[in-house]
Each structure stands twice: as C-alpha cells, then as structure tokens.
Image (cartoon, rainbow, N blue to C red):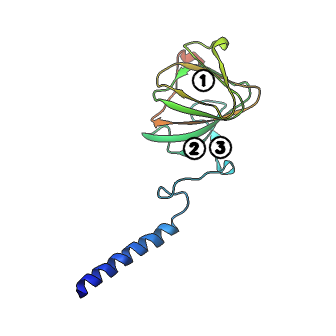
C-alpha cells in the first residue's frame, strides 16, 4: 500500500514539473503555436527573385516540409509566366494582385484580387502576375521544397 502511494506521489510530481516547465516555454513554441504581429516580421531581399522582399513565418520553402511566408511586390511589378513544383495557397494581405494562367503573359487573362482574396496555384501550372498601382503583400503557404521555373528562362528576373 505504501509503495502505491509513493508511485502516485512520484507520478503527480512528474506531471506538475511538466506543467511548470510547459508554462516556462516561450509563447512561440511548437507546444503553444506561433503568434506574429506585422511589426515582428523580418523582411529580407528575396533569395529567388530580384526586387522582391520575403518574410519567413513558418518553415523554409527551400526545404522539405510545410512553410508560410509573405512577399512584398513593388507597385506595377510584372512577373512573366512561370510555375512552381508544389501546390501553393495565396492570401492577398494588401494591394491589388492580378493573376492569370498560361504560358505567356496576357493582360486580358488577368483577374484582379483585392486584399482578403485567396487563391490556389497547382504545382507545375504556368501563371503570370502583375501588382496593382500600389505595393502588394501576399502570404504564400505550401509544402517544400519550392522553386521557380520560367516558361522562357530569359524572362527570369534573377538574371
């Protein structure tokens, strides 16, 4: 009987120490989730596309696994037809984002997406983009590794 009480006491101590340790874990841990306010984003030059800025939020799009990041596009930024190897989800945070499908930029095929809009891009499907008259911020999520392949490599803005 005494042995059983000691086991229960030990179990309670282990549980309590786990709760205390859990409370000490930072708010942005895998246990509690991640919370990011706009002023906490760290913007850096895009590693893939000249003229853009990225802010990583979750994961790394160049590696295996889930990722979420934001991209800033300057006003009137035009991106020629390209594709990505993975399926992607986009949310327009600010500005007007114009997207069209096809292997060649065609302004007649663009659809204007205002802030709050959402769309998906299937992997390996060519599309093209045009930022509106003001800068645009989009949030992108998917499962990496990611990449960019231009229909016409001469159009790659990294050149």
The furthest residue to the front:
1
* Label disc, if present, on residue 94 of the rendered structure: none
Quadrant into which the N terminus falls: bottom left
Q: Identify the residue at image location x=54%, y=57%.
A: 28
Counting residues from the start of the chain, the first of labels 1 and 3 encountered is 3
| Residue 21 higher or lower than 151, as above or below | below
Tell me where residue 71 appears, x and y as whole percent.
63, 36
Q: Is residue 13 left or right of residue 76?
A: left
Q: Identify the residue at image location x=47%, y=67%.
A: 22
Query: Which residue in the protein does label 1 denote?
Result: 159
Query: Which residue in the protein does label 3 denote?
Result: 43
Q: Identify the residue at image location x=50%, y=38%.
A: 61
Q: Give the spatial CA distance, label 1 vs label 3.
A: 22 Å
Dot 1: within a 10 Å radius of its alpha carbon, few (fewer than 14), some, or many (20 or more) residues? few
Q: Give the spatial CA distance, label 1 vs label 2.
A: 24 Å
**In what element is the residue under mark 2?**
strand
Counting residues from the start of the chain, the first of labels 3 and 2 encountered is 3
| Residue 15 higher or lower than 92, as above or below | below
Dot 2: within a 10 Å radius of its alpha carbon, few (fewer than 14), some, or many (20 or more) residues? some
* Label disc, if present, on residue 56 of the rendered structure: 2
| Residue 134 higher or lower than 56, as above or below | above
Q: Nearer the viewer, residue 70 or 149?
A: 70
Q: Nearer the viewer, residue 33 or 40?
A: 33
Q: Give the spatial CA distance, label 3 vs label 2.
A: 8 Å
Mark 1 vs mark 2: in front: 2
Q: Nearer the viewer, residue 105 or 20?
A: 20
Q: Is residue 51 left or right of residue 65?
A: right
């Amino acid at each position: 009987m005494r042995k059983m009480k000691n086991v229960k006491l030990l179990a309670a101590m282990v549980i309590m120490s786990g709760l205390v340790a859990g409370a000490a874990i930072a708010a942005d841990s895998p246990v509690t989730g991640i919370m990011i306010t706009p002023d906490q984003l760290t913007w850096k030059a895009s590693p893939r596309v000249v003229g853009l800025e990225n802010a990583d939020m979750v994961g790394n799009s160049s590696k295996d696994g889930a990722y979420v990041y934001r991209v800033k596009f300057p006003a009137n930024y035009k991106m020629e037809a390209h594709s990505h190897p993975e399926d992607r989800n986009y949310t327009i945070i600010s500005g007007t984002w114009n997207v069209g499908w096809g292997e060649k930029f065609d302004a007649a095929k663009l659809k204007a997406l205002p802030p709050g809009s959402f769309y998906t891009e299937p992997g390996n499907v060519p599309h093209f983009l045009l930022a509106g008259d003001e800068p645009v911020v989009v949030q992108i999520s998917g499962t990496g590794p990611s990449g960019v392949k231009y229909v016409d490599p001469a159009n790659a803005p990294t050149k």
